[in-house]
Amino acid sequence: MTTPGDRAAGMASFFAPGSIAVAGVSSDPEKMGSIIFANLLENRQRGVLGSSVYAINPTHGSVMGQRAYASVGSLPEVPELLVIAVPGPQALGVIESAAKAGVKAAIVVTSGYAEAGRADAEARMAEISAESGMRILGPNTIGVVDMASGVDTLFLRPTKTLPDGTQVASLLKPLRGGIAIVSQSGHLGQALIEELTAGGVGIRALVGTGNQADVSAEDVMEYFADDPETKVIVLYLEGVRDGRKFLSAARRASRSKPVVVFKAGKTPGGARAALTHTASLVGNYDVYSAAFRQAGVVEAASFQELADFAMALLMLPKPAGGRLAVVTNAGGVGTIAIDEAQEAGLRTDPLGKGVADRIRSEFKGSGLVYNAALGNPVDLTASVSTEELVRVVEEVVSSDGYDLGVVLPTHQTPGIDPDVAIRLIPAIRGTGKPVCVCVVGRSELASRIHLEFMKAGIPSFPTPERAVRALAAALKYAQMQKERTSLALAAAPKRNARGTDVPFTREELASLLASHGVGEPHSMVIKTQADLMGLKKWRFPVACKLLSPDLPHKADVGGVVLGVRSPEEAGASLARFQSLARKRKVRFGGMLVQEMVEDALELIVGCTRDPTFGPVVAVGLGGTYTELVRGLSLAVAPVTPAWAKSMISGGSLGALLKGYRGGPRASTAQLAKTVSKFSQILLEHPEIQEIEVNPLMARGREMISIDARAARSA
Amino acid sequence: MTTPGDRAAGMASFFAPGSIAVAGVSSDPEKMGSIIFANLLENRQRGVLGSSVYAINPTHGSVMGQRAYASVGSLPEVPELLVIAVPGPQALGVIESAAKAGVKAAIVVTSGYAEAGRADAEARMAEISAESGMRILGPNTIGVVDMASGVDTLFLRPTKTLPDGTQVASLLKPLRGGIAIVSQSGHLGQALIEELTAGGVGIRALVGTGNQADVSAEDVMEYFADDPETKVIVLYLEGVRDGRKFLSAARRASRSKPVVVFKAGKTPGGARAALTHTASLVGNYDVYSAAFRQAGVVEAASFQELADFAMALLMLPKPAGGRLAVVTNAGGVGTIAIDEAQEAGLRTDPLGKGVADRIRSEFKGSGLVYNAALGNPVDLTASVSTEELVRVVEEVVSSDGYDLGVVLPTHQTPGIDPDVAIRLIPAIRGTGKPVCVCVVGRSELASRIHLEFMKAGIPSFPTPERAVRALAAALKYAQMQKERTSLALAAAPKRNARGTDVPFTREELASLLASHGVGEPHSMVIKTQADLMGLKKWRFPVACKLLSPDLPHKADVGGVVLGVRSPEEAGASLARFQSLARKRKVRFGGMLVQEMVEDALELIVGCTRDPTFGPVVAVGLGGTYTELVRGLSLAVAPVTPAWAKSMISGGSLGALLKGYRGGPRASTAQLAKTVSKFSQILLEHPEIQEIEVNPLMARGREMISIDARAARSA
């Protein structure tokens, strides 16, 4: 067995191996193994790839004009990296012999495993890797493209031949640059490359992680976190195996460079079993999204945004704040940009009077002053000249009132010269601020202007919405960097299946909650009419609840009576509960009498075990609206009080805590402390599958559980 | 003065005039007037334009080698259409003399009016138009491009000259087709043309409505509604002047052909920008969005969607339902498509067993069966061949289980031939169902495949999200066509400014509400301690409210006591209110005692006057959460009971009405009737500016006002 440190170090063999062999090179040049071998050979011959390259074919002594070896064992040296593109049934044997031979890393291109219902072979690959120390990427992966070393295992043909015999480019090859792509879909990895290449943006590497039998997206991310040539990490994720490992790897990576993620598989077709109340409120995707925030990772909402954000985070200087200036010579795009900015939470303050006056005086008597609207957007209208546009961009974007700029230079109007980009670039650079441009149109000139901006490192987009969102992403990353709090991620806790139905007793729960910051209202258990004497000095109204180990959902069957006004009324409830228990044939454990907590906010707080991330904590509005409003705030547990505060400060909950419209108020700081303490429960108690307090009454600094439930781990 | 019929008929002069003159043709070929004249002349010479064309220049006898006339009056004939591109200060004079001369239609390209703070000149244009019958488009407009008649007033140069002397295309010229574009931004109109042209899609016409001094987007939409060559109407709107006229024009147009709209100026900042841009009156965006639904118009959420939806609605057959099949040979894009489909409300049922079995037996023993995941998406993986892909698309999409298809044929894999589109097209057409494809990539082959699909009338998009949303838009249009209810839009009511502070009395409100379907709880007004005797037989608890004409917000100052349990407690409240009135120096109008309505849903219903659309009605959840949840459902008033039902049936409100989690329930049909009746109030009562019942307690068929307020019109 190897140490974690060895295993991390082993990753290097994928990227810069001394030697590479390809298993599955065939006489048919269209087979995946042949394409990969041809790529590597070409890179070797062009001097891009320094590694020696070998073909393995069990039956032919030569393929594609090159010597072929019958097996890994018959190669002149043990290859550091082995690419496996043999037919499905043979792959495992090749992996086993490679591990025995001392191969350091294997890329298993072969598919037909878990994705086709064959998971056991993957478990075996994980075992082989753990035993031998050989790292395995895949199976079902597109492999690795490393622009520095020349490793390229993509089995895609760069050109295809049309029926009439002409060759057309069927993909764009990557340029060398700073973006590292980690993708659980090989095709989308290539699609990202093409999107970047089309904009003249280069990549550091592409890694397809495939089915992740051994090497996971987390492992690759860790590698790029430490790689100085990597400036931005881009992740296409469908799911991670170990949520906590992902969270800590992403958190470490995002400390030194932007990480952008797009999560697909948000709405899994198979219905997830609803556990108890809290769990059913929370989809697995919501936990991912919460974990991304905790990791300081920027989440893209679409595949297009993933590419857009990567380019923006690569190119833009760090925003100092969120005040956006929009400068345009066409009103419509300016209006759209302002809409999108407000939607994205950016400020769109009007142009300062000083700046507007300077512009008016500089261009006194011109058509610009006659026509322009010097607000935000600054709309210079269709009659403006290139020179005027450039000057106004300088004045407006560099002014103290703004941190960010969007420039929308419509090139179709007569006054705008075709070299508008070349003339705007120094003006935009001169501001020193993050600026995106938007070039709308499909003409040759539009594409020329777009590429001129991109080449100059100014992100350019074809719609105003995308330009604004890219800026907002840059701001988000800067804000997350500022707000990093310590994140006490305990070791991954035991994962548990569905809980059993044996409920916790009221006393067990009360003591558990008490030790985690949640109190109980003044309470008493009454079993007989004689016990009612104990209520004499109580303040009414009170709540009466039927206690029975067999009735976890007592409210649904009439086992809760609120607003009981006297000991006599309580007596009536007692009689009713006793008869109810008889009728339902459940054990009667007495009647719980609790002082009613009034003038308090009704909240909900719960912890559950997510199958990917383990314990998560949720807090939000309680009562009827919990499910309707879907306003639960989530985090991977445990959370610090500072993080808990950020969870409860926004939105409806934040407004209610401050005493919304004269309603009850509660201490944000105290609730944050309570949530933080409560978020420890599942880490300390592996026997609990999930726990929920609903409602949690919050009043000032009091946090009181009116009802709580917990389920045992299986 | 002319009749509305005359005025509508007058619109034709913009599109197919017998003669056109351009005022403002200059010796400088770069001036707008010169570019327009050159365009028209070229179209005339090419035989595209049948109209005679004249140049007007007050000082030169000839311009651009053509004879120029000094004024409208000196032309050899009165032109049917006059294009005005003279400098700002001269435009009004030209318009006046044109109207006198009998010109039928004028396009005022000249800018610098309301958008630059000069609104009075526009008011004068409206007057001239009303008096003379001459229709005026603009000012500040890009004018008209009519692909049938050859009218083209765009002042944009199709090519520009680079510093090195080479010419580049600076815009794409439109193709002739079925999409009519109505745009309040000339630039975005041109951008739409380029987006469509790049996909090989043609337009019927483009009309920029500019500042809408006379001709509005509504007028143009009405024209295209009756135009047989127009298949889809696309609107870029910043704001409309007369919301009701827009609503009825859009409703009429959408009955016969799809109308797609993108509304900019959604946010306060964006609205301000739009105001300066086209000087349009921008109303509350939520009201616009409600009106779009009432009009049966498909709303696009972004500029990109506007183009996407237009193409989809032009090309796709009508969907029979919302069950989507996704077929792909790359897992990632398939997963994204399923996510987006569920987000968009489409059904993504798994592939039927029968179809899966047929595929397995047809391809028995092949790599396809070994690797493919026959679910939804149907993922054929990277090893599939073109032929297999085509067959599976046929089988899956044409199967009974699906109404819609998204096909994602990844062309980069070795097994996919470059003529994949040509081979998929008949298969897709053969299904007879609406199918969008997604071609991801930036290579020459990607663009070739994309265009092959587009040319065949199969909408193709570069990301899975856009393909799915386009299908969802087609479904939305089909559903809206099915669900059209009668819409009793009364004549536009008087518009009122903000109301005065003289409140309505309780009695006035109660009788008004009673006549509009809203009752009152059992109530009594008590002025003295002696009156308390009247409460003897009441059911307690009751609510006590201080009545004072000077205290509209009585709850905020302690003027409401809930849960009063006896006549004695009521007496205490009375004394308290009397002293409160004295202290606050407000008139004491007695104490209103009302039976408390328990076990009811707390709702809110209100009517207000929107500056653009006039009376609107809103209904939603009441109580504390009204503002937090922001779940109000809106419509332009009045609404039929059927429409009211559609307003309250969805979301949280719909769930609550049915008795959510054992809570109180109320009749959806009765609430719909009440909302419909209530929605009449502002139409019948011009003296009311707005009225709100909050809370409206709904219990079964009872609809009871606990508190109501109304403001008088100024």
Image: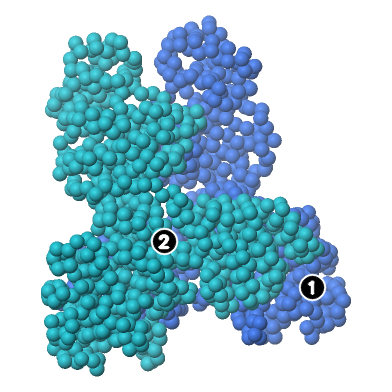
Chain colours: A cyan, B blue
Q: Nearer the viewer, mark 1 or mark 2?
A: 2
Note whether residue B530 is visible. yes
Q: Nearer the viewer, residue B189 or A106?
A: A106
Q: Residues within 10 Å of mark 2 (few under 14, many from 20)?
A: many
Q: Residue at x 31, y 30 (%)?
A: A518
Name above or below for residue A686 compared with residue A696. below
- Quadrant where the C terminus of chain B sits is top right
Left or right, B521 with reference to A381: left
Q: Amino acid at mark 2?
A: Lys
Q: Position of residue A488 (x, y in %)?
A: 31, 46
Q: Position of residue B59 (x, y in %)?
A: 87, 76
For residue B460, what is the image quadrant? bottom left
Residue under pointer 2: A257
Label 1 vs label 2: CA separation? Answer: 57 Å
Q: Residues within 10 Å of mark 1 (few under 14, many from 20)?
A: many
Name above or below for residue A673 compared with residue B56. above
Q: Residue at x 61, y 44 (%)?
A: B610
Residue under pointer 1: B24
Chain letter behind tag 2 = A
